[in-house]
Image (tube, grey):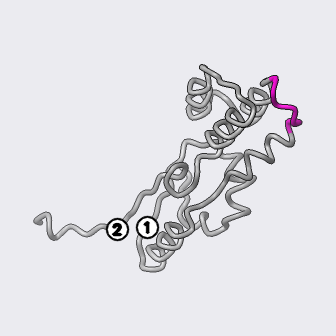
Amino acid sequence: MTNTDKKITTLIFDCFGVVSSPVLGSWYKINSKKYGFTDDNIQNVFHKYDLGEYSEDDIVDYFSSYEEIKSTKKEIREEIDRYLKLDEKLFKKIMEYKANGYKLVLLSNANSSFFNRKVFPAYPEIKLFLMKL
């Protein structure tokens, strides 16, 4: 079999930063500018969240610890959720790939509770190409 005989059957997409906007980073960036605070530890916090060491509740607790933030934990979670924005043009193309028989995989190291609470209800089509490991 030559390289030209190989057929692509599966496409893999990263979720946040590709198919969707990065929700936590967006919340932090906008609020730190709005209220004028900086956090030298924020990248470490995001890293621990990505590794599963911090839960969504841990992140909300962390964000609520900023003196400048007067929102309740519930309000912070709702604010974070509002930053979920799919790249609609890319998402439409992905659905075309699915309709044309490609196997699709959405990769993310995001917490599954975020997907269950926010992503799947807002975009039920995503279940078409999400794989459980």
Q: Is residue 83 left or right of residue 86?
A: right
Classify 5 as above or below 66. Answer: below
Badge 1 is on which residue?
103
Classify 101 as above or below 1. Answer: below
Which image quarter: residue 5?
bottom left
Which residue: 14% across, 63% down?
3
- Mark 1 lies on a secondary structure that is strand
Percent position (x, y) of residue 29? 64, 37
Percent position (x, y) of residue 44? 57, 23
Classify 70 as above or below 10. Answer: above
Q: Is residue 69 magenta?
A: yes
Which residue: 42% across, 76% down?
101
Q: Choose the circle earlier in sequence order: 1 or 2.
A: 2
Q: Nearer the viewer, residue 65 or 38?
A: 38
Percent position (x, y) of residue 112? 66, 46
* Residue interval drawn in magenta: 67-73
Percent position (x, y) of residue 106? 51, 56
Q: Is residue 60 left or right of residue 13?
A: right
Q: Which mark, by number, is residue 9? A: 2
Quadrant where the image shows the N terminus: bottom left
| Secondary structure mainly formed by the magenta segment | loop
